[in-house]
Image: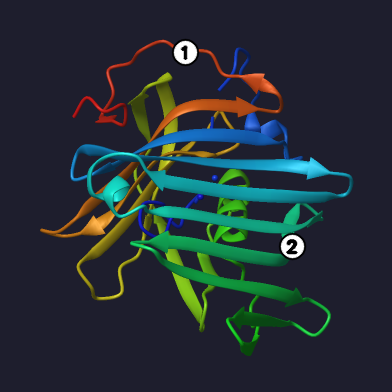
Amino acid sequence: MALSKFNFSLGLGALVFTVLFPSSLNAEPRPYQLIYEVFRNGKLAGQAEVNMQQQGERWIIRSEGSGTRGLGRLLGVTDAEQAEGSFIDGRFRPDRFSHHSRLAGISDDWSAQFNWQEATVAITKGKDVLSLDLGQGALDKLSLNIELQRRLREQDTDLQLFQVSDDKIKPRTYRLLPAEQLETSLGCINTQPVELVPTGSTQFSRSWHATDFDFLAVHLERGKTNGTHLEMRITAMVLDGRKIAPLTPCSATHSGSGGR
């Protein structure tokens, strides 16, 4: 999932289908498409799509979003990110990543080239190139989402990750929240919520991962206490070529369908 003005860093990744595939029994990567509506302070502001597709031995993850209502539309907000790489022993290893966003006519573009043999990443922004040590296996935003989903699926308790940004590598530590049944536009979905551990600021970032659907993110929230609150709510899903049909409604402990 991407969208620097609308999207979220947990993945950052449209979603649906007619048969449930138990994710715990299927660790192989599967292509998907997830469609979200984006809300700002409870009002519909935009839309986003995240998809992962295979091309030969390589996989491509794309995230695109745009402001379609209100201030987002007025300012012409758009955001697009892409990661390319391969799965090695079940883990996604990116080769390159690109980011492009636009706000009020001003563009923000940068890219990252990964060199796993030398354990470095070259970040290019305009004419400037910055080389950083990958350390403990730092990943771009989209690839980090894939790794987080893998760890949730395999019940790995180590949720400390490292994210490559346009000028540095940032530690990202997550913690599990109690499991929830989430009412969405697709019906009732069993989820594992995850929260990014705050670093002393008033910002928050949480995502709800569908335990029956490869732990893909079906709801995301990000914002600042007593400030702007952004949400991404799943509206459609395609997993492994199958469109997910609406599921049975539930008496959810948390609603991600726009009914709050």
Label 2 packing within 10 angstroms: few (<14), some (14-19), many (20+): many
Callout 2 secondary element: strand
Residue under circle 1? Answer: 246
Q: Quadrant of residue 216?
A: top right
Tag 1: residue type? Pro
Name the spot of residue 138 as percent of width and height, x first. 61, 73
Q: Earlier in the sequence, mark 2 or mark 1?
A: 2
- In whole angstroms, how far apart are the C-alphas of marks 2 and 1? 33 Å
Q: Are marks 2 and 1 in contact (CB under 8 Å)?
A: no
Residue 225 rendering spot, x and y as whole percentages? 15, 60
Give the percent coordinates (x, y) of residue 135. 64, 83
Label 2 is placed on what type of residue?
A: Arg
Q: Is residue 207 left or right of residue 100?
A: left
Q: Is residue 121 left or right of residue 70?
A: right
- Which residue is at a point 64% across and 88% down the rendered structure image? 129
Which residue is pictured at 55% across the width and 23% down the height?
A: 16
Q: Is residue 155 in sight in this rendering?
A: no
Q: Name the outermost residue toward the right.
A: 56
Quarter occupied by residue 67? top left
Residue at the limit of the structure toward the left, as seen here = 226
Badge 2 is on which residue? 93
Q: Height in image: 245 above or below 43?
A: above
Q: Of 193 and 44, which appears nearest the observer?
A: 44
